[in-house]
Amino acid sequence: TFAPILTKPANMSRVLDGFTLEYELLEAAKPATVIMVLTVQPWSEVPDANSPHTIVFDQPKETAAVHSLPITNLTFLSHHNYDVLSVTPVNQDLINGAAYRLDLSYQDVAGNTAASLTGNHFFTFDSATLAPTLTSPATGSSIGASFTVAFVIPEDMKDGTCAIAITETGGLVDDPVPNPRVLTLGTTEHVKGSYSYTLTSSHMAQTPFPQNWVASVSSKFDLSDGTEYSFSLTCEDVAGNVAVSVTNTGILYAGSSTLSPVLSKPTTAQCLS
């Protein structure tokens, strides 16, 4: 049996839900012998307790030709696709973030020994952007003129998509400038990891921003003393999945000085009885 040829997905690629499987058979296959096995790898950062996943292809995918098939998810594949004879285990999809080895084999119609792909073929299944974590400033906290911004990026993100939006939500003082202020993170901060920086409010009004961890700022104004804000961190992963956000709320900006209290009663020169 001549070995099959795999053209998609590319080795060591990240694939979306709905990725294309493309392979070529150099000769016709014996019925029910075209088999793909997806096995989670020991070095995968995300486990898959249901691995390996075995897909047996049906007659339309057994001819000597180039075959292409969208892999939306394994549950859908097993119930709604005449190209597929069976999927095991049943009703168990691939796991977001897990790394798999793809094996493809078949036996020719003459009944010769089955042949498999040559070399190793690995991919990471990437069906959704993993949510970032914003650890500081925390929900319900108060911040001064300089404060810590700390966050965790759980996977590599598409450059230019990670941004922190600072939006007025309340407080004693109305913020008179356009909201939100959006800080797009630098290229380095799109790489998987934990980050912590000091943000000085007045720096947001400067061009360029004086620290490399911020690539750009929209609405270049200092925060308003006495105003309450929300901080949202949004990212889109390198695979191009939908961006996700995390938001901390009720963060009071106290500035660099205490606001003067206002005494409304009694009034100046008022007689008290």
Image (spheres, helix red, strand yellow):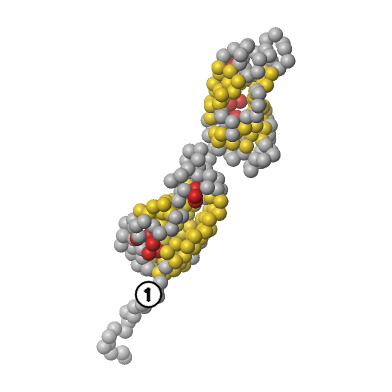
Quarter of the image with the C terminus is bottom left
Q: In front: 55, or 157?
A: 157
Count of numbered marks = 1
Residue 57: image location, x then y, percent? 62, 20
Residue 180: image location, x then y, percent? 37, 55
Give the vertical position of 30 relative to 131 (above or below).
above
Q: Which amino acid does label 1 sit on?
A: Leu
| Residue at figure coordinates x 55%, y 17% from the top left | 66
* Residue lying furthest top: 110
Give the vertical position of 41 relative to 154 (above or below).
above
Give the vertical position of 193 relative to 255 (above or below).
above
Q: Taking the image as drawn, is residue 223 in sight?
A: no
Residue 162: image location, x then y, percent? 46, 48
| Residue at figure coordinates x 55%, y 54% from the top left | 194
Quarter of the image with the N terminus is top right
Pointer 1 residue? 259
| Residue at figure coordinates x 56%, y 29% from the top left | 10
Q: In front: 112, or 228?
A: 112
Q: Taking the image as drawn, is residue 129 in sight?
A: yes
Q: In front: 191, or 31?
A: 191
Badge 1: residue crowd in 10 Å (few <14, some 14–19, many ≥20): few
Residue 177: image location, x then y, percent? 31, 60
Q: Is mark 1 on a helix, strand or loop?
A: loop
| Residue at figure coordinates x 36%, y 56% from the top left | 208
201 to the left or right of 148: left
